[in-house]
Amino acid sequence: MEKYNPKLVCFSCKFGWGYLTEEPALASKINSWIPVVCSGKIDTSHILKAFRAGADGVLILGCSEGHCHYQDGNVQTKKKVFLLQKVLETFGIEPQRVEIRFSLDPEGKSMPHLLNKMKENLIKLGPVKRL
Amino acid sequence: MANKPKVAIYWLGACAGCDEAIVDLNEAILQVVETVEIVLWPLAMDFKYDRIEAMGDEEITLSILTGSVRNSDHEEMARLLRKKSKLVLAFGACACFGGTAGLANFKTREDIFNWVYRDAPTVVNPETKFPQTETRINGKILTLPEFYDHVYTLNQIIDVDFYLPGCPPPPDLIANAVNAVVSGDLPPKGSTLAPRSALCDTCSRNKKKPSRMEIRQIKRIHEVEADPDSCFLAQGIICLGPATRSGCGETCIKTNIPCRGCFGPPPGVVGAGPKYLSALTSLIKAETDEDIREIIDSIDDPAGYFYRFTEPTSILGRKMPGKQMEE
């Protein structure tokens, strides 16, 4: 049997994550990486569409609290994610499949590690059961 | 007489509330009957299906179909009426978006059968018998329609020309729709025969909405005495007005009940549920993660709230029989 390799979509804020590095170089280490202008720009439907398209998990990386370039976009998305996790459960998608982290990492050095850590958790969960 | 346009009214997976709404046209229905010939309407009159089968293709001018598609009988009738009709109107929230019946998509067919025929406390079924599509008794075969694993909207099964949402649609929009068909003054195919704005735009409570809304506690309508003039959301009561199309006549709002979203999303919105979710959370005012979670955890069955009428059209819930939906 082929080893299960979870598909992970990573949205990250350009103001906090990986802006000092060459985007293509970092992108080569992270599949399905979508840098956005602010984590607050991530619409709930983007996350759902990722699952619809076959993602096993979604990782959202925003700026640390108090450091949002647009005042509180990160917090707005955090609230969305908390509620979305409850909604996803009804659809048969475990809440752990959406993770949100706030920090600053201009060189994006920790990003591949964070992705791998989430992938390990997804391997424990296995593929999305319903859908 | 012979030249009157023919109209069929048929229920699929419906509760007959939509049929009742047509009856509620009251005197106006007499004018409708003057101008059209009703060839099928199980709620009101006796007709035989083989008469419809014997008709020529597109002989019926308009088929008004209510309800979702949940079993093989619904599908068969939807396909038959599509073939025999020039125009098909998806009538009511169930035909348009799946309706409340669509919430059944949160469970599998197996879950539903197990509960309804085995596990519910009121069920007595010692031999655990489940409905079969074919049963042989004394050499005869009895048949039942096949119960599908999914609730479909009408347009996931057949081509639909027009949509009239609502649970049920209000009389003025029904009369407009019928008149448009009779007079031939029709909007482009695929149109929804209802206004384009969101409910909040026409809501009388909008005037008393505070400039900055902050929800610190979610309340359910039966737990409080809601102020009859103030915005529900400003009172912490979940109201789907921001993500719902107007045109319903605001019967709920006028009786001090928040909008539940039976008119579906305004035009251009795919997935009213997530849009509403984003809008609602942006109003939540809390400092710490614990406080945010406390407010969110107090929302009972959020998926049921946000997808009450639209689950089968939602990003995660939609399905087309036999093929994968493109996103």
Image: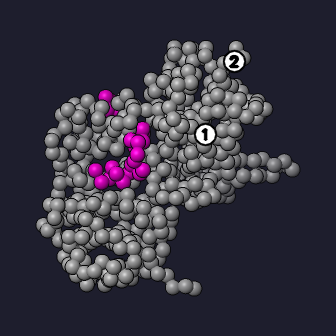
Q: Residue B235, how many percent across, how many down?
A: 21, 42
Q: Secondary structure at mark 1?
A: loop
Q: Quadrant of residue B10?
A: top right
Q: Residue at 25% of width from left, 61% of height from top? A: A40
Q: Amino acid at mark 2?
A: Asn
Q: Is residue A63 magenta?
A: no
In the rendered view, tell whether residue B45 sits above or below residue B98.
above
User: Range of the magenta residues?
Assistant: B252-279
What residue sits 24% from the left and 70% below the top? A14
Residue B294: horizontal and vertical position, in percent? Answer: 23, 59
**Main SS, magenta residues:** loop
Relative image position of residue B63 (x, y in whole percent)? 62, 32
When the figure is inspected, residue B42 is found, relative to residue B101, above or below; the finding is above
Question: A37 and B193: which one is in front?
Answer: A37
Q: Disc 2 is attached to a residue of which chain?
A: B
Q: A96 or B126, which lies in front?
A: A96
Mark 1 crowd level (few <14, some 14–19, many ≥20, 10 Å Cα): many
| Image-based side of B140 in relation to A47, left or right | right
Q: Please, is residue B214 above or below residue B209 in the view?
A: below
Please tell me which residue is depicted at 49% across the width and 44% down the height of the picture.
B97
Viewer can see residue B67: no
Q: Which residue is mark 2?
A: B3
Marker disc for residue B12:
1
Image quadrant where one finds the N terminus of chain B:
top right
Which three-letter amino acid code belongs to the residue tagged 1? Leu
Q: Residue furthest left?
A: A66
Q: Is residue B70 left or right of residue B193?
A: right
Q: Which mark is residue B132?
A: none
Front disc: 1 or 2: 2
